[in-house]
Image: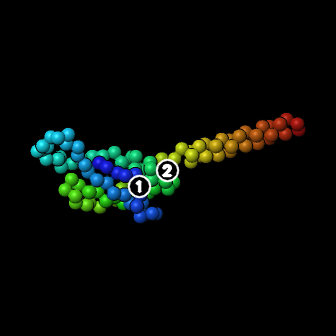
Amino acid sequence: MIWDGEFIGGVNKEINLFLSHESNDDTCKAYPPKDIGFNLNPIKDKCLENYGNCDSINVNFYDYEGKVHEFNYSINNQSMPLKNNLYLILTISAIVIILIICILFFILKKKEK
């Protein structure tokens, strides 16, 4: 499978994928299998990196005969780019620190009475 790493259509998040085969000078008389699977995680990761949010990608898949098959790749958007994870961790850490300070302040005030 070949992808140039580019998204077309702007905010529509559309890509072109091409099925390819390197024959290595073999006559390749065998027919391709009916079902072929591909890992699309690199495409999802690139979409998240480029757009920050990526619910789905419109895919134009060109098979070995050059026929185009259009489908929508729905993405379970549970993973976030590292910078968003880091921001979330820092935010939660700050909240925990503030809560600890408030509790300590409350305890110290109570002991003074």
User: Residue at image x 19%, y 56%?
Assistant: 65
Looking at the image, residue 82 sits to the left or right of residue 19; the answer is right
Q: How many marks?
A: 2
Determine whether the residue tagged by mark 2 lies in a helix, strand or loop.
helix
**Residue 47: percent from the left, percent from the top?**
45, 53
**Residue 94, above or below 53:** above
Residue beneath disc 2? 49
Q: CA distance from mark 1 to mark 2?
A: 12 Å
Check if mark 1's residue and mark 2's residue have beta carbons within 8 Å.
no
Q: Amino acid at mark 1?
A: Glu
Q: Earlier in the sequence, mark 1 or mark 2?
A: 1
At mark 1, the secondary structure is loop
Residue 94 in the image: state x and y as whole percent: 68, 43
Task: Tell me what residue is drawn at x 31 percent, y 49 percent.
Answer: 2
Q: Which image quadrant: the C terminus? A: top right
Q: Nearer the viewer, mark 1 or mark 2?
A: 1
Residue at image mark 1:
6
